[in-house]
Image (tube, coloured by chain):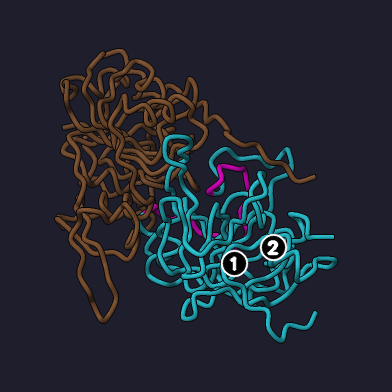
Chain colours: A cyan, B brown
Amino acid sequence: MAWSREEIAARAAKELKKGFYVNLGIGIPTLVANYLNEDSAITLQSENGMLGMGPFPRREEVDPDIVNAGKQTVTELPTSSYFSSADSFAMIRGGHIDASILGAMEVAANGDIANWTVPGKMAKGIGGAMDLVAGVKKVIVVMEHTTKAGKSKILKRCTLPLTGAAVVELVITDLGVFECDKKNRQFNLIELAPGVSLEEVHEKTEAPLHTEGFVQ
Amino acid sequence: MSKIFASPELALKDVLSDGMTIMSGGFGLVGNPESLIPEIKKAGIKDLTVISNNCGAEGFGLWMLLEARQIRKMIASYIGDNKLFEALYLSGEIEVELNPQGTLAERIRAGGAGIPAFYTRTGVGTIVAEGKHTEIFDGVEYVRERWLKADLAIIKGWKADPAGNVVFRKTARNFNPNMGAAATVTVVEVEEIVDAGDLDPDCIHLPGIFVDRIVKSTLNEKRIERLTISE
């Protein structure tokens, strides 16, 4: 069985070290918060201007002035702080955030990522993604390995307009964990999801994939 | 001279004209100048350039200026689920300049701070950097971005005193203070106008020098885009 969205998020949470300041994107990345606890001492930053994001509110706690970057209602913690958008991106662009976990439509072996538009068809906008991939110390992509049509999203080169060039460090999909080896323009297989064969992952990965010596 | 105006309509009197550039605060539907936007719709001014992170949502905020086709050009970072905005963008019916969110925020900050341009890593190697000057600093390539300024900023605060000192509330702060500093005329609507001395001078988010007009909000719907509850 390949990993579910929840399992992808749980695996991504393991990449976060104690004391990290982390920004989570929309979709699977948001689920990563479910796998953090007090011991992990992770502080979540939300680019709309909040550091120290709490869990989603109970119904009676809902405050329309407290949302995350995905516009979901959230809660504050005793140590939370609020700030302007300019200050928020000073944290991001200035290299003060340790890790960014975000989704993607395509990633490539040279570390490129595309996740904001399909020209002529879809435009959600750029949002904070370009700043995050350019400024955050470690960029982790979580996504389905293939499109709904079964096409590999891990490519030799991205075909869609880029969000960032040579920025991705690690990709976690339903099939496994892949390290972006920019120097050798390939992905190195780090871990396979249970029940996924080397054969399957090769078949579903368009980018060069280094699996030599990999032991499950 | 008092900065306090009696109504949103009066607060925008004599400052609206066709073809002007307007900054409008807010992130999604949080921290939007909900009472001032309908007055711009009513005034019927057109060919506007609007600078705002988003463009409202169906029936809410800047969406109503899109719907009335009062906006010629939108400078924003995110379209999201705003179907009208997406359709107008994809069809080319309005000019849209999409910015990375942090670049948008910094361009506005720079506008208010008198800094005509700055360099950033954001967007290097993407279409955002196309046609822009790039330069290598300490071995890394950066792209040059220009400041943004506006004729008018409409922003939403929580509390203001008669001197125009403003305090924002939680994530409703977002772009509001940055925009407040970057416009020729800044009009702030607030939930509460307090007396001089009621705000702690150590806790002012936008000092009064940046604020020209203050008005009490008449609309505080604060629509929630994605109500998310923990079980």
Looking at the figure, which quarter contains the N terminus of chain A? bottom right
Which residues make up the magenta segment?
A: A69-85
The residues bearing labels 1 and 2 have C-alpha atoms spaced at a distance of: 38 Å
Above/below status of B225 relative to A155: above
Q: Is residue A156 left or right of residue A31?
A: left
* Nearest to the observer: residue A96 or residue B208: A96
Who's the residue at 63% across and 72% down the image? A178
| Chain letter, disc 1 residue | A
In the depicted view, which residue is nearer to us: A155 or B92?
A155
Q: Position of residue B71 (x, y in %)?
A: 28, 24
In x, y percent, where is residue A20?
Answer: 58, 74
Q: Disc 2 residue type?
A: Glu
Residue for point 27% across, 43% down: B180
Q: Earlier in the sequence, mark 1 or mark 2?
A: 1
Q: Which residue is mark 2?
A: A203
Residue B12 part of the magenta segment: no
Co-location on one chain, circles 1 and 2: yes
Q: How many marks?
A: 2
Dot 1: element: strand
Q: Is residue B99 left or right of residue A43?
A: left
Q: Residue under circle 1? A: A43
* Residue at screen point 37% across, 70% down: A94
Task: Please provide percent x and percent y for residue B57.
Answer: 48, 28
Looking at this view, name the residue that lies furthest to the bottom.
A213
Q: Nearer the viewer, residue B202 or A39?
A: A39
Vertical comparison of B105 with B49: above or below: below
Q: Taking B71 as reference, is A187 left or right? A: right
Q: Contact (CB < 8 A) between labels 1 and 2?
A: no
Within 10 Å of the Cα at label 2, are there few (<14), some (14-19), or many (20+) other Cα atoms? few
Callout 2 secondary element = helix
